[in-house]
Amino acid sequence: MTEQIQGEWPLYEVFVRGKRGLNHVHVGSLHAADDEMAVRHARDVYTRRNEGVSIWVVRSDAITASSPDEKDPLFAPSGDKVYRHPTFYDIPSNVPHM
């Protein structure tokens, strides 16, 4: 991680759940002095048109992620578990969202 400039507020990642959504979606980033300010600023910046029902803010330095370079070794173990993919099953036409 790069060195934090003295006096710079930490960076937060913002996730919003829309009125019609079932999950939170990453919508952007912002700097804030603390968690409460991050939520208020996220509300003001990312839900100005009243489109959200829930906001998550997470300090960027608290997120651990995989690297795209690790894609093959990280996700390869699930490739041999074909039973996890619905390609071998007959799905009735009246089942929605499959």
Image: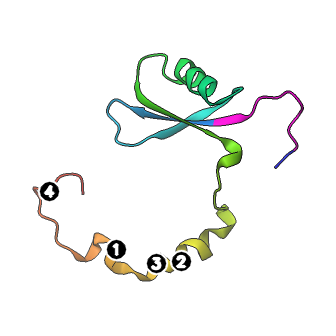
Classify mark 4: helix, strand or loop.
loop
Q: Which residue is mark 1?
A: 84
Q: Residues within 10 Å of mark 1 (few under 14, many from 20)?
A: few
Residue visible at 66% across and 69% down? Answer: 70
Residue 49 shown in magenta = no
Indicate which disc, 1 or 3, sits on the residue closer to the N terminus.
3
Q: Which residue is mark 2?
A: 76
The image's colouring method is rainbow
Disc number for residue 95: 4
Q: How far apart in space, not on screen, are marks 1 and 4 (Cα)?
A: 18 Å
Q: How far apart in space, not on screen, are marks 3 and 4 (Cα)?
A: 26 Å
Q: How far apart in space, not on screen, are marks 2 and 3 (Cα)?
A: 5 Å
Q: Quadrant of residue 14?
A: top right
Q: From the viewer's perspective, is residue 8 above or below residue 21?
A: above
Q: From the viewer's perspective, is residue 91 above or below residue 37?
A: below
Indicate left or right for 7 with 34 as reference: right
Indicate left or right for 51 with 64 as reference: left
Indicate left or right for 5 with 49 as reference: right
Q: Which residue is mark 3?
A: 79
The reply to whether the C-beta atoms of the residues labelled 2 and 1 are less than 8 Å apart is no
Q: Residues within 10 Å of mark 3 (few under 14, many from 20)?
A: few
User: Which amino acid does the dot numbered 1 rest on?
Assistant: Arg
Q: How far apart in space, not on screen, are marks 2 and 1 (Cα)?
A: 13 Å
Q: From the viewer's perspective, is residue 30 above or below residue 26?
A: above
Q: How far apart in space, not on screen, are marks 1 and 3 (Cα)?
A: 9 Å
